[in-house]
Amino acid sequence: MTTTTSPGVTRRGRAAAAPPAIDPRPRWQPALVILLVWFVVWLFTRGHDTLVLLGRDKTSVMNALNDFRDHMLAGRDTNPLMRITGALADAFRSMVTWLQRLISIPAEPRPVPRIGWLGVTAVATWLGYALANWRIALLTLGTFVSFGLFGYWSDSMDLLIIVGVSVLICVVIGLPLGILAGTKKRANGVIEPVLDLLQTMPTFVYLLPIVLFFGIGAASAVVATMLYAVPPLIRIAAHGIRSVPATMIEVADSLGQTRWQRLRTVQLPIAKRTIIVGLNQTTMAALSMATIASFVDGPGLGKPVLAGLRINDVGTALIPGLLIVAIAIMLDRGTTAASERADVIARGGGLKPPVHRALLVGGGLAAVAALWLSTQKFWAAEFTDRGIGRRIANVADHAVDSVTSSISPFTGSIKDGITYGLLNPLQSFIAESPWWLAFLAIAALAFVLGGWKSFVPALACLAGIRFFGEWHNAMITLAMTLVATLLCMAIAVVVGVAMARSPRTDLAVRPFLDAGQTIPAFVYLVPVLALFGPSRFTGIIAALAYAAPVAIKLVADGVKGVSATTMEAARSTGASRLQQIRKVQLPMARASLVLATNQGLLFVLAMAVIAGMVGAGALGYDVVLGTTRSEEWGKGAAAGITIVLLGILLDRIARRAAEPAPKETQWLSLPRGRR
Amino acid sequence: MTTPADSSALQVRGLWKIFGPKAERLIGTPDAALSRAELQRKSGHVIGVRDVSFDVAPGEVFVVMGLSGSGKSTLVRLLTRLIEPTAGTVVLDGQELTAMDDAALRQVRRDKISMVFQHFGLLPHRKVIDNVAFGLEIRGDNKTNRRARAQNMINLVGLSGYEQNFPDQLSGGMQQRVGLARALAGDPAVLMFDEPFSALDPLIRRDMQKEVIRLHDEVGKTMVFITHDLDEALKLGDRILIMRDGEIVQIGQPDEIIGAPADDYVRDFVADVNKAHVLTLRWVMRPPSSDLEGVGAPTLNQSTIVRTAARTVLAHQGVVRVVDDAGSFVGVVDDEDILRVVVAEQDHE
């Protein structure tokens, strides 16, 4: 509703809220003043009160957190919460162990699992054919054989087991919740904020509390994976149900349907396709988190990757990393193809030629035979390790060495340029400031950029960061996050605009982005580590690789969303290509740019923890330490909480600052007004 | 003109719909008498339907006509309580819908009313036959019965051979035939149409209108038909209710609407209508100067449509006598009267 047309409305609007009316001063002017003051004070006070926490130093808050942990653990048998989580942990653990004995580890007294590699591979391949098509079957066959060939059979099975169990729990919990959120407004009001919280929390942060309640090992891996993977399913299922056209609901009502009939015959069938998309997302998320869960001793392929990263041995980490990517591709393509085929069958196209049916039956029989064989013969049960994996690792090591040494002048100059030109100055500015100075300056910036609505949460977050004692590390992480986000947005705008303007570029780039999004988070570290060695910069690049695909897609889609008519009009005025981009496309894609920045920030921050182990240090390092050393749990928890607070702080400032200040900004009126 | 209340298929009394947080409290206060715009400015409430009462006789085609925003779509939803009325009563076949609990209302919807929607509302994941049988499935008919019944309905609307297709394989007109068949399948007492043909091309629309007329002749259902198209209203309606801003402007038979518009709004509305196709002799005749005027001339009933009467009148030199249903002599028409309607119908402009 426009405020200018009706006199009654404008009068009330003016009386109620004066400030948002028209403020001719751009908001960056006071922000610049604050930065200037910050700089001047910093010149005289740098290095004082920076709250550096050396080595194993702990504040009293961290010790209190440790005490709290000890208290909880001591009350394991009496505390009702601990008893419930304990029982759940036992249930998950025994479920995982049972499956492991079935296909992955020796089922005592047998020296091998109950079903050997041949049986598992045959059944998986047959399923690929039955549920999807022969291409997926081949992909599955290749992936499973390579598990054994490279000597990671049992780790691969473990990873699949964790993913499978978690996804199963996700479906059992997530589908009803998704339906509830999709049909009941009030339920959605409760569920939505919880999902927001779960999804903004950096991946790593929930590992610490989960370890406390579920102990180290498979149970924690399952719970962490489930918590990370369930939000997309709930959200997308709810969205699918909500987007069932109103007419169809009306039809159902007018025919006298009960709620249950409506759900069963109208809402679920129509939302089915969307729900399957959600399931695909959930599976991919589960794979990503199940890999990371090796930090809490979760079984799976993450373990060898982690071991390789810990000793900076790229060769060791490379093969399991690649296998994880192979699993990702297999699961992604497999679920997509299966859902497409299910659609075809539902529409009556499922009647396949006799050849196919013969293959299906024959393949099934062969799979059963292989299954039986694998329980009887040792060669079919245990994949003989021919040392291929080790040989490839060695080759890879050499290759990596020669590649790195040959391009090291290049990578080195990028690294040095960004480290000395951007990262170091920023870090010394932010982290070498006395804490009170940075505190006041950031709060003031929040106020001038976002008003009260960002000032209050910013103040709370800053106070929280100060309270938990990780101030100095938080400032270092902040500096890295800002640099990474800046680079991320620069790349996103360049690539995104290029993609939006040329369908061919889009076609060429998009598969890489899709792949980037399907690859589990910390597999990125392997090649980046190979190229740049352990350093803060490596952490930044890893974060960039993780965050950029999302940001690029958002920018590309946003720019593409600018209507063809508007672009035509812009061209008709004789705007040059750069003018079109600068004056029409980017301003009109503003909402997407803001969203991309926000997502970029959160993704970068999520990666900060993982980057902590390749030399990025700061908060990430403390969190990693907390998951591995019991006496550092409190410090790790404090660092984890600090990351969350940092995330909220940045999110609030960025979101508010990006809101158009006066109602009629030049952004919005430009395309129509300037002709 | 209105049929006695006890024998009507649908009886609506004092029906109101006000959208807004405290809608119930507004009824009966002076605010309720404010115009739509004033009320919205004053309290933020929007009047959807204001104090509407009418009766629909069994077997009648009752058309509700109005422009967009006139409240006609809200009205039809109030009749089945797809939208809850703020006040007023709706009685269908002697049962008061507005007093029912959810279960009873559901039963009525299953057995007595069906609706045809503007955007068809077909379920994309079901074949044509299962779409038609959908309502029967809802009310729990067994599969053999509902399939047989659905097949009959598909034949009735002329879609034989398309049973196994999916809705998106059909054209818009065919999709709406499926919608029609679905509505007819439950053998309802009353059929409600919410602008069923406005999403269709003009030619298809004409076909579908004929189809409705044919079906009405065949099955004789009571119909409430919502439209924004005056020609459609005149073609289909036994009676027409014209709405504006949620209120009734006029209720009457097509020739009454054209011949005696209630106000300037309706007069403006019907200005472009081809009056010769709608008006009857009653509206063009003049009282006879004496009982003997035109003795020996042809005699026509007063409910003859002008267009039909034109040939007789023009062929005859002088006046033609007009009689009512009882046969008594009520007026005369001559060439001038007919031509005024046929040729110079836009004279007031």
Image: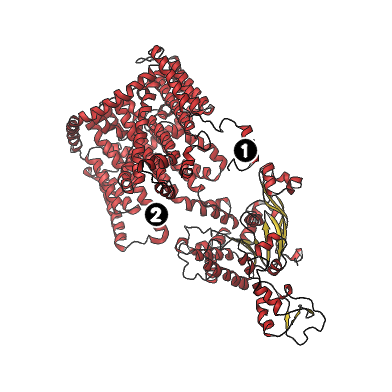
Q: Residue at label 1?
A: A10
x 69%, y 46%: residue? B38
Figure check: A45 above or below A170:
above
- Place of residue A501 in the rendered image (x, y in percent of width and height, measured from the top left): 35, 46
x 58%, y 42%: residue? A2
Amino acid under label 1?
Answer: Thr
- Place of residue A569 in the rendered image (x, y in percent of width and height, measured from the top left): 43, 48
Figure check: A354 above or below A75:
below
What chain letter is assigned to the residue under label 2? A
x 32%, y 60%: residue? A357
- Place of residue B169 in the rendered image (x, y in percent of width and height, measured from the top left): 44, 63
Q: How many other residues sit within 10 Å of disc 1, few (<14), some (14-19) or many (≥20)?
A: some
Total labels: the figure holds: 2
N-term mark: 1 or 2 = 1
Residue A439 or residue B170, whichever sits in front: A439
Residue A606 or residue B204, whichever sits in front: B204
Amino acid under label 2?
Answer: Ala
